[in-house]
Amino acid sequence: MPASIHPCLSCGACCAAYRVAFHWSEADDAAGGTVPVDLTLALRTHERAMRGTDAVSPRCAALAGTVGVATHCSIYDLRPSPCRAVQASWADGAADAQCDRARIRHGLPVLTPEDWC
Ligand code: SF4
Ligand code: SF4
């Protein structure tokens, strides 16, 4: 994989693998919130989730493109904290369990240190 192409841009698996839940105050109907509330749904008492992720086959409503081919987050600068916590494996010198599980779920090979050379 050419080092100039970030692996996430041809993946998107973690945006279509998990329920993405966060405190309601991260939505933009709360003071200081950033996540467009229309892209979320109410979950438990204090939580909202990204629309589309609370499903048996999750896919975030903010994900654009085709998983495993070309994807991007349409609200990247506004995304909630769980999304910011996921790191592509070996981007910072270590594997990330969520990244690996998501890629395996979508039939993609897990990333290795060589993907960053
Ligand atoms: S963090 Fe991992 S699973 Fe998520 S888009 Fe990047 S490479 Fe894919
Ligand atoms: S908000 Fe963006 S980064 Fe987070 S799951 Fe949705 S598409 Fe992925």
Image: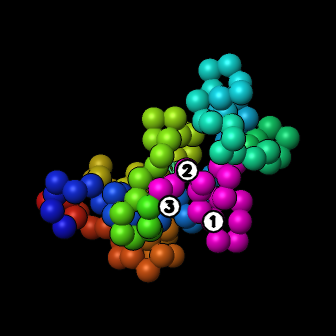
Q: Is mark 3 within 8 Å of ligand 1?
A: yes
The residue positioned farthest toward the right in the image shown: 45
In the rendered image, residue 73, in percent from the top left (x then y), is placed at 46, 49
Which residue in the structure is indicated by mark 2?
A: 62
Neighbours of disc 2 within 10 Å: few (<14), some (14-19), many (20+): some
Q: Do the residues bearing badges 3 and 2 touch, measured as CB atoms within 8 Å?
A: no
User: Which residue type carries mark 2?
Assistant: Ala
Residue at image position (27%, 55%) is 6
| Disc 3, SS | helix
- Against 115, residue 92 (above or below) is above
Q: Which corner quadrant of the image does residue 67 belong to?
A: bottom left
Select label 3 or label 2 by which is in front: 2
Residue at image position (70%, 71%) is 56
- Camera-side residue: 67 or 25? 67
User: Which residue type carries mark 1?
Assistant: Pro
Q: Is residue 94 left or right of residue 1?
A: right
Which residue in the structure is indicated by mark 1?
A: 58
Circle nearer the N terminus (3, 2) = 3
Q: Is residue 7 left or right of residue 26?
A: left
Neighbours of disc 1 within 10 Å: few (<14), some (14-19), many (20+): some
Residue 101: tell me if it is visible.
Answer: yes
- Rounded to the nearest angstrom, the CA distance separating label 3 from label 2 is 12 Å
Select label 1 or label 3 by which is in front: 1
Magenta region:
49-64
User: Which residue type carries mark 3?
Assistant: Cys
Q: Which mark is residue 14?
A: 3
Predominant secondary structure, magenta span:
loop
Q: Is residue 54 magenta?
A: yes
